[in-house]
Image: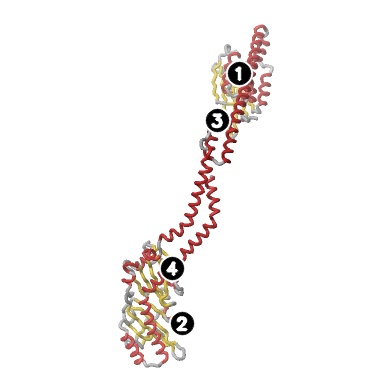
Amino acid sequence: MLVVRIAFLLSLALLPIGLVAMGQSWRALHITNENLEASIHARTAALVAPERQALLSKIGIARALADTLGATDLTNAACTAVMQRVRDSNPRMAFVGLLEPGSVSACNSMGRAFAFLPDARSEKLFADPEPYITFTPQGPASQLPVSIVAYPSHAADGGLRGFVTVSFETEALVDLETEAGPNGDVALLTFNKFGETLSTYAPERPISDYLPEGLALDGFVNQRGSFFTATTQSGETRLISVVPILPGEVYALGSWGRAALQRTSAPWFSISTLLFPFLMWLVGIIVAVVSLNRLVLRHISDLGRRMRRFATYRDVETSDRIDDAPSEIQTINETFESMADQLLRDEADLENAVFEREVLLKEVHHRVKNNLQLISSIINMQIRQVASPEAVAALRQFQDRVSSLASVHRALYQEPSLTRIRFDVLLGDLVDQVTTLGGAQDKPVEIDLDLDAVTLLPDQTSPLAMVTAEALSNVFKYGGPGKDGVFRLVVRLKEMTEDDVTRVQLVIENTVNTEARPPQGTGLGKRLILAFASQLDGELRQAEEGGFYTLSIRFTCHPFTPD
C-alpha cells in the first residue's frame, strides 16, 4: 500500500531525529535511575546506622582486647578480671573471652573454663586467622541469641594466641518503626561475609516474603553496592538495595516496596520521556497520511473505482472531484477517459467482425450440410433405379457416410460456439439416423445409450463421427439376435481424467448370431475405421467374445487453444 510505503520512508527520514531524542530520553531515565539508586542506598544505610555503630563499638572492644592481650603476658586471673570489667561496663554484653586454639576458653567473663565443640568454620579461622562477625540463636556460653564479634590476638613473636570473642544480645534495629515502618514499606536484613543472617526486620510478614526466591547473600560480598528490581516469593515486585555496613564483613539488604519508587521517581516523567520520540513519529505520520489522502489518495481511489466500473460494465463515469486534484492526476484522468472511449469503439468494431465471421461460418456449414443432404437424396433416387442388390448395398453404405458428414455440419451450425461440439448429442443423432437408414425394420434392435457430456473440437469430431457411422453400419450388416433372440446395441461414451490429461472412450457393442454368419464384405468399412482412428491418434480394439462384438476406441481430448 502507498500509505505504508510513505510511512516507512517518513520513518527513515525521522530516524536520525528519533535516535537523538531516544538517546536523550534514555539519558534522562538513566540519571533518574541513578538518583533513585543513590536515594535508596542512602535510606537503607541510614536505617541500619544504629546497628553499624553497635558493631563498630564491639569490633573496637574486641580489637583493643586483642592488642592488649598480645602486648602483655597476663595471668589467667588477671585476664579474667579484665574480661569481667569489660562485660560489666557494657550492659548488653553476654560474653567476653579469649578463644584459644582447640576451641577452649580459660580467660573469659564467666570466670570458668569452656570447651567448645570444634567445627569446620573454627578450624579454618584458626588456620587462616581473620576477624569475623556472626550470629547464633543460642550462644554456647550465655545460651542467649547473640551476635558474636571475633578478632585475632597475636603474641609479640607473631604467634596466634587465639580470638578475642565478644558476644552481645541482639536488639531491634533502632528507630526502624518510625523511620520505615508505617510509610516506607521496607524490610531489612543484615548478613556477614559468609552469607549468614545477623538481624532482620519485616513489617508484617516473615522476612522471606520480602526477598527473591533462591537469593544467595554471599554473592554481594566485596561489592560497593547492588540495586535491582526483583519478584519476591509472595509474587510482589520490590526494589532490592544492598549496601556495606562494614566493607568486607557485614552488609545490609533493604527490600523496598513500590511506594519508595513512587516517591522517588514520578511515573509521568518516565512515561512522557519514553513516549516523546514515539509521539513525534506519530504526529509526523498523521500529517503525512492526511496530506497524502487529501492531495493524492482520494483522487486515485476515485479514479480506480471508475476504472473498475469501466472494466466491469463498460461505462465511462465522470468525476465531480477531479478539478481539485493535482495537475498530474488530472492528466492521468484525461488519458483514461480518452483510452476508454477508444476501447469502446475498438470493441464495437471487433464484435461486429466476430459476428459477421460467425454468420459466414454458420452459413458455410449450413450450405455444406444442404449439399450433402442433396447428394444423399440423389443417391437415394439412384438406389430406387438400381436392380442389383450388391449395388443397392454399396450405394446405401455410401449414403450413410454422406449422412454422417451432414450430421457433423448440422451440429456445427446449430452450436452457439463454432469451435466446440457436444459429441454426445451428435452421437445420439447418428444412432437414430443409422438405425433408420440401416434397415432396423428388418432387424428390430434394443438400443442402450450411456453417454457422458463430451465436448470436442471439429478436428476430432469428424473422424470420430465417421468411425461411429462405419461401426453402426457394420452392426446392422453383420450383427444379429443373440442366444435369447434379442438384437442388442450398447453405445457408451465416457470422459475420464488421468494424470491431468482428459481422455475419451467410445464403446460400441452388439450381439451376433453365432449360428448364422453373414457373408464377408469387401473390408472397406474396416479400413475406413482404421484410417479415422489413426487421425485421432487413438487406441482401437475390436473383439468378439461371449456372443457380443465390441469396438472400442480411446483417445486424448485436445484442449481448446485459440490461435
For disc 3, the marked residue is 314
For disc 2, the marked residue is 128
141 or 235: which is nearer to us?
235
Q: Residue 455 location in percent, x, y?
A: 58, 26
For disc 1, the marked residue is 410
Q: Which quadrant of the figure has residue 329? A: top right
At x 38%, y 86%, the residue is 98
For disc 4, the marked residue is 35
Q: Which quadrant of the figure has residue 172? A: bottom left
| Badge 2 amino acid | Asp
| Of callouts 2 and 1, the N-terminal one | 2
Quadrant of the drawing holding the C terminus? top right
Q: CA distance from mark 2 to mark 3?
A: 102 Å
Question: Is residue 229 toward the left or the right of residue 504 in the image?
Answer: left
Answer whether residue 212 is visible to the viewer in this image.
no
Q: Residues within 10 Å of mark 3 (few under 14, many from 20)?
A: some
Q: CA distance from mark 2 to mark 4?
A: 41 Å
Q: CA distance from mark 4 to mark 3?
A: 73 Å
Q: Nearer the viewer, mark 2 or mark 3?
A: 3
Q: Above or below — where is 316 with respect to 149?
A: above
183 or 480: which is nearer to us?
183
| Of callouts 2 and 3, the N-terminal one | 2
Q: Nearer the viewer, mark 1 or mark 4?
A: 4
Q: Residues within 10 Å of mark 2 (few under 14, many from 20)?
A: few
| Badge 1 amino acid | Arg
